[in-house]
Image: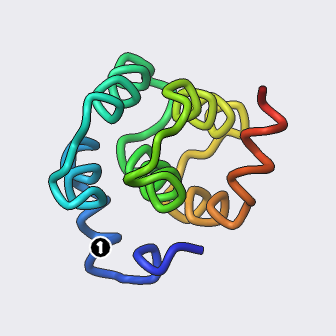
Amino acid sequence: MNKLLNDQDFLQFCETALPIEVVEKLTNNNIRGLENIALRSISTRKKLPANVVNVLLVYFYSAFANQVYNRNDLARLYDYWASNEVRTMQQAVEMTNENIEQVLNSLK
């Protein structure tokens, strides 16, 4: 699990922050075009609560921050979490225990 998800202050931030604010924090305000595309791909989906989306972003960017990644991977993970009916922060934190590479490979 990502060490940020053990930080109570950071979890409180995730409860109320906008997804863009979470990504800014995770990328040290270095939001690239790729991040904007990935965020736009999930912004219209309304299947997950905002705080769950924020945990998903921590999970995703902990693995891929400052790397080139498939811009559709974030949307794939979003849909995967939605299909698993992740509705609470606790459920979201539990989902971060899954190996992200294995999950993404199984979704492609």
**What residue appears at the point 74 percent right and 59 percent down from the top-left corner?**
99
**What residue appears at the point 52 percent right and 38 percent down from the top-left corner?**
69
Most extreme residue toward the top is 44
- In this rendered view, identify the residue nearer to me: 28 or 107: 28
Q: How many neighbours does mark 1 have within 10 angstroms: few (below 14), some (14-19), or many (20 or more)?
A: few
Residue carrying label 1: 10
Q: Quadrant of the N terminus?
A: bottom right
Instruction: From this view, report whether residue 78 is shown above or below residue 17.
Output: above
Q: Position of residue 87 (x, y in %)?
A: 55, 46
**What residue appears at the point 72 percent right and 40 percent down from the top-left corner?**
104
Dot 1 amino acid type: Phe
Q: Position of residue 29 (x, y in %)?
A: 15, 54
Q: Position of residue 72 (x, y in %)?
A: 55, 24
Q: Secondary structure at mark 1?
A: helix
Relative horizontal placement of residue 105, taking residue 73 as reference (left or right)? right
**What residue appears at the point 45 percent right and 49 percent down from the top-left corner?**
67
Instruction: From this view, report whether residue 90 is shown above or below residue 105.
Output: below
Relative horizontal placement of residue 91, taking residue 16 as reference (left or right)? right
Most extreme residue toward the right is 106
- In this rendered view, identify the residue nearer to me: 80 or 103: 103
Instruction: From this view, report whether residue 67 is shown above or below residue 12.
Output: above
